[in-house]
Each structure stands twice: as structure tokens, then as C-alpha cells.
Image (spheres, rainbow, N blue to C red):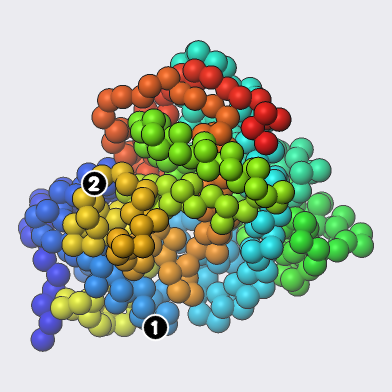
Amino acid sequence: MAASAPGPRGLRATIAAGRSLLDDPCPALDTLASRYGRTFALRIGPQEFVIVGDRGHVRDVLGADPAAYRWRPAFRNLAIVIGRTALIVTDGEAHRSRRRLVQPAFARRRLDHWMHLIIDTVDETLEALPVGTPIDLEPVIRQTVRRIVLRVLFGADLSILGDDIGALLEPAVAYTNEPLLRQLPHPVPFSARARARSARRRVDDLLAVEIAHRRATTREAARDNADMLDVLIDAGLTSEEIYDQVVALTVAGYDTTTAAISWCLLRTMRDAALWERLRQEADDAARDSTELRLTDLPLAHATAQETLRLHPPGAVVPRRKVAPGAIGPYRVRRGAMVLYSPYLLGRDPASWAEPLAFRPDRFLDPETPVLQDAWVPFGSGPRQCIGFGLAMMQLATVLARCAQRITFAPVTGPVPRPVGAITSHPEGGVPVAIARRRGARESR
């Protein structure tokens, strides 16, 4: 009979390990993996938590029959924010049918159209940045990414609606980033949970008005430049389903993308030669193509991939096992919470040469083996994040445009440590001083 996965034993050691994973997951994963191996388990009473960071074992999880796992129990706490019909909290046929309806909103031709929207939004941000004055870029990045996501959802002409919805959702986003113990259901009024629930109701009210207006108006959702709300309405989703998909895409889209862009800028600003190569690539792409696409920015795309290898926004991704089985050589009980770890995968010396070195060229060199099943920041298969194409486009395009238009004062010192219970952000933000800035027209 297969053995259980190794892990801490005894109540005190198990509680200490569990608390460290909840409060400070990335350092805790490093410590626990060094002690017990890259796949290990914690058992608290009848509940088993299996953290999976070995590439072969993660393949067992991601390649398993989707019916072997359930996602709703793992993300139950998010339901008061993203709703009960959002893709991330649905399973089985409900998930498959809704995903089929939502998928056209992320077609490649639509992503290519949104490239200019992303560039224009980034340019607006860069124009307002001060030169020579130290600032923290992370809140600036957050506002920019939120604006991009909401313009994709509602169109550039409805930026006021998007800004209102974005502002209303801030308490809900803040709630989803609270430590998990603080997200336990409770009826206490005037709490973070109550504020999140109230924010969601107010957003639904705004969406109801806009959806009713659009349904009463002839619109062409099939056109490539249609915004996402038109596509969702045209797909035949119910109003509740539209509300939930819009909120889920907003909440998940801009918080995780903000973290990824923050890490990407922090890493690239420390390498002047890489920054210059990114600038040259963006300049060449702008000269050689009237319609800029992600394929025109291979180095920026590789830099985004390398960033997500080392700094995936989610250190672990949970799901619940619904039948007993095995992961690698280990027995896993029915009801166990299985958390595969993109963070451990991306730092595994068995999969990556010099795993802690920031080397984007590893994703460009045809002689270097890149193990795709060791790079899963968005998951894979039928549960892969539906917005991964948009996220990668934002990450690469924002990086390329920043490299093209601004020069930072030299950045030195150690790379900040990751912080955050749910989404991994750099401690201290992104402190920089801009030494030079090119105009938007000059760099196009």
C-alpha cells in the first residue's frame, strides 16, 4: 500500500507549519520543502493538506480526470465576492458549459485588438510619472492594470463606469487578500466581510443598469473590437452569470497582474543590459509593424515567463480530492485539500539550471530545455486560467513600453522578499527614481 506523504508530526509542529504557510507562504514553502521534500503533507485532525511541488507529482494532479477534484470547496470563501457562478468556483458540467460561453471573449483576435488599448493606457500613466523624484510604482501599476482590465471589460468610452466599479470593488479585493483565517464566514456587521458583501451588491446594481441598456440596444458583439461585456451578453449568459464573470475577472485580473508586473520591473531594473535589449526590441517592433502583437516582443514575453517562474502571484493553488487515490508514490485520502505549488516548481533545481538566477534567455534559447510542465503559473488543461492570454499580453506589453519610454536610476540591493497570504507581492513595493522619460510620439 502507498505511504502517506512526509510532513511535520505532532500537534505543535503541525500548527506551526500551518500557521507559517497561511501567514508567509513563500518562505514557509522553501523551509518545509527543504525538510520533507517538494511534496509534503500536513494533517490537522481529520483534515489533510497535501502540498505538491515535485514536477512529476504535479503532472499527476493537473493531468488527472477533472472529476477527481472539486474547486468550489477550495474557493468557498471567495463566493461572497465573485459569486456562485464564477468559473473558479464551479465544477463539472456547469464549469464546462460556462467556460464554452465565456471563451470567445478571450479569442486571439480580440487580444491583438486590445494591444493598442494597453499601450495607450500605459502611456497615460508614464506621462504623469515624475522625473527625479523617488516613488513607489506598485500603486501606480495597480491603478494602470485596473484601468486596462476595466477598459477591456466595458470599452474605453465607458471608462467612468469602469472607474466606478473598480473603486467599489476595492474593499472586496482587500478582503480576498486577507489571511484565510480572517475570511471565515461570520455575521458580524461593519467588518471587512460585510464591506465586501456590500461592495458586491452595489456593483451588481451598476451592472444591471448597463446590461439592460445594452440588451435594449442593437450592438455587434461579433466584431473584433467589441468589449468583453458585449461578448458575454451575446453569449446568452444570465444576468447573474454576467455579474459573476465580470467581478471575478476584475478581482482576479488586476491584483495578480499587478503583483506580476511589480516583480517583473523589480527584476529587470537591476539589469541595465536587459533593459536596453527590451528597449531596442520595442523600438524595432514599432518600426517594423503597424499592428504591434505579442509575437513582435519575444524578449519581453520571455522576461514575463521568467518572472512568473520565480514569482508566480499564487504560491499554491488549491483543490479538494473527492475520491481516494495516489499522487506519485503517496496515498491521498478522499476529502484532502491538494495544493500544487507553481512557486516550488519554478525553483526546482531538478527542472531548471541555476533555478534562483533571473535569466529570461532560458525561454529563448532552443538549446536550453524548458520544461513546460514545470511552468504552470496559470495551471493547465480544462482548469487553466481563462484570462492567461490577456495577463501575458499585459505583462509583456507594459514591460516593453516602460523599457521603451523610461530610464531608471541604477537599482541595487537585494531582491525584496515576497509577502502576502493569497497574492505574492514584493515587500516594500517598487521604489524607483525615473532618470529620463521619452515622449509617447517619439517612441512610437
For the point 66% across and 25% down, the residue is 439
Q: Eyeballing the image, is 129 above or below 400?
A: above
Which residue type carries mark 2?
Leu
Crowd class of label 1 (few under 14; some 14 to 19; many from 20; radius 10 Å): few
Quadrant for the C terminus in the image: top right
For the point 42% across and 65% down, the residue is 379
Q: Outermost residue, bottom direction?
A: 1
Position of residue 6 measured from the top left corner of the image (x, y, whole percent): 11, 66
Position of residue 101 measured from the top left corner of the image (x, y, whole percent): 67, 73
Of callouts 2 and 1, the N-terminal one: 1
| Foreground pick, 414 / 101 | 414
Dot 2 falls on a residue whose secondary structure is: loop
* CB contact under 8 Å: marks 2 and 1: no
Quadrant for the N terminus in the image: bottom left
| Foreground pick, 198 / 116 | 116
| Foreground pick, 303 / 443 | 443
* Residue holding disc 1: 65
Residue 356, label in figure:
2
- Alpha carbon of mark 2 to alpha carbon of mark 1: how far? 33 Å
For the point 10% across and 60% down, the residue is 36
Which residue type carries mark 1?
Asp
- The reply to whether residue 180 is visible in this rendering is no
Instruction: Give left or right: position of 318 versus 261.
Output: left
Crowd class of label 2 (few under 14; some 14 to 19; many from 20; radius 10 Å): few
Instruction: Give left or right: position of 243 versus 302.
Output: right
Dot 1 falls on a residue whose secondary structure is: loop
Position of residue 263 measured from the top left corner of the image (x, y, whole percent): 40, 39
Position of residue 381 measured from the top left corner of the image (x, y, whole percent): 45, 74
Q: Eyeballing the image, is 348 above or below 5?
A: above
- State which quadrant residue 430 falls in: top left
